[in-house]
Image: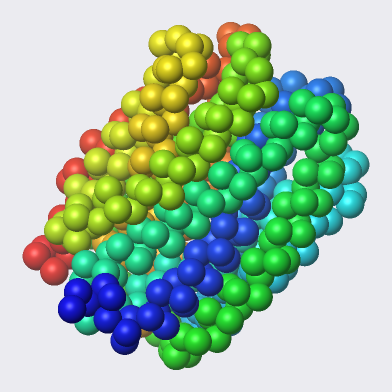
Amino acid sequence: MDKRLDKKYTKEWFILLGLLLGVTVTNGFARFAYGLLLPAMQAEMDLNYAQAGWLSTVNALGYIVGAISTMFLVQKFASEKLFAFGLITTSVVLLMTGVLPTLEAQYALRFFAGTFGAVSFSTAGAIASGLFKENARLNALSIAILFGTGGGLGIILSGAFIPTLIDVVGNSAWPICWIIIGLLSIVFMPFGIWSALQIESSKPSRLTRNEFRLLKMLPELAGYACFGFGYIVYLTFLSAWMTAQSIDATMITTIWVILGLCICISPFLWRPIFARFGNGIPLAMVLSSIAFGSVVPLLSPAFSILILSAVIFGSSVFMAPGAITNFTRKNLPQEMWAYSISIFTVLFAISQTLGPYVAGLIGDYFDNIGMGLVTAFIILLLGALVSLSQKELSKN
């Protein structure tokens, strides 16, 4: 019998499903629904591109705080407890985002969504890395599914109703959209908590300078930082760019759903790459794909071109966290997984803080947010080139 169907793995698949729903909340909803709601929020609050980018940047600043906090928290608390805490608090914040629609409240809530989301997201990978320990291929697949399908599901669900609701009700419906997202998060929350409680409590990280070879991971770290800067520009401003091109709500909904679907199936495309390589090649390949997917819309606003962009970008974007998690699992002992991933997350958080704001400034300067996408393309390709030099630590 195929081991994938072996009953001994049944519980682990259910655990993965719960973790996946947690990532849907802390990643798909908390971070990327904003890109869909940006045009409506921008119109209602009379924001320019730089101001809209700053709202995203505030979220990223919160993500930095959460990621740095997690670096220390994983040395005192089990990853499973931190994951559950982050999931609960993020769900509450998302609901409150719709309840308190003032600009001042939005700045605070976007910050807290980033902070609590980072705590949960940073520890999710370390937890999933412990699943299917006896089967390397299934382990690689589970990591990819966690980030890919988890985030993709959030984009699909958001894309399925937000553009249509805004089109029918008007821009003033954006708080209602956040309330719906918050309620969905609360529905998903118990499943994520259950999964975390099923995992044997991991020991907090205990590290020494000799154990954690940070300098030997610099190419992978630098590549992931470039990912943070580049990918967020596309997800933050794609809807705004399509709206500026007078693309209707039905087409925008279709593009986002296709994007989400491709993200969901991306784990199955990348699993063989993750299973085979323990160096920087997977991240380099992922970043190259993201780069080309992000710049394709500038060729033409034609529907077919936008679909092509969504397919290329969606098939790779959420595999970057999977690539660094896979790298961590293959090169470091288990007690250092959570700490290592939190290091990656801190650099990622800092770089993605700059991305939307810089792209917004460039968009305002040229009066065309498409130039921000070009900037993201260049940064992503640079990250791919740097990542190629990363070797397996065990072979250094």
Q: Is residue 149 visible?
A: yes
Q: Quadrant of residue 43?
A: top right
Left or right: residue 75 versus residue 139 is: right
Q: Quadrant of the C terminus?
A: bottom left
Left or right: residue 32 versus residue 6 is: right
Q: Quadrant of residue 173?
A: top right
**Way the structure is coloured:** rainbow
Q: How many marks?
A: 0
Please identify the residue farthest to the left as the structure is shown: 395
- For residue 4, above or below residue 279: below
Q: Nearer the viewer, residue 156 or 59?
A: 156
Q: Nearer the viewer, residue 388 or 137?
A: 137
- For residue 173, above or below residue 219: above
Q: Which of 27 and 65 is in front in this view?
A: 27
Q: Please state the horizontal and vertical placement of residue 226, each as a whole percent of the image.
A: 40, 40
Q: Please state the horizontal and vertical placement of residue 67, each as a whole percent of the image.
A: 55, 62
Q: Can residue 351 be seen in this view?
A: no
Left or right: residue 146 versus residue 121 is: left
Query: Residue at 48% of width from left, 69% of height from top?
Result: 17
- For residue 95, above or below residue 50: below
Q: Quadrant of the N terminus?
A: bottom left
Q: Nearer the viewer, residue 353 or 38?
A: 38
Please identify the residue farthest to the front as the structure is shown: 1
Query: Residue at 65% of width from left, 52% of height from top?
Result: 30
Q: Please state the horizontal and vertical placement of residue 176, each as a whole percent of the image.
A: 84, 44
Query: Residue at 88% of width from left, 43% of height from top?
Result: 101
- For residue 347, above or below residue 260: below
Q: Please state the horizontal and vertical placement of residue 181, each as a whole percent of the image.
A: 72, 52
Query: Residue at 14% of width from left, 58% of height from top?
Result: 276
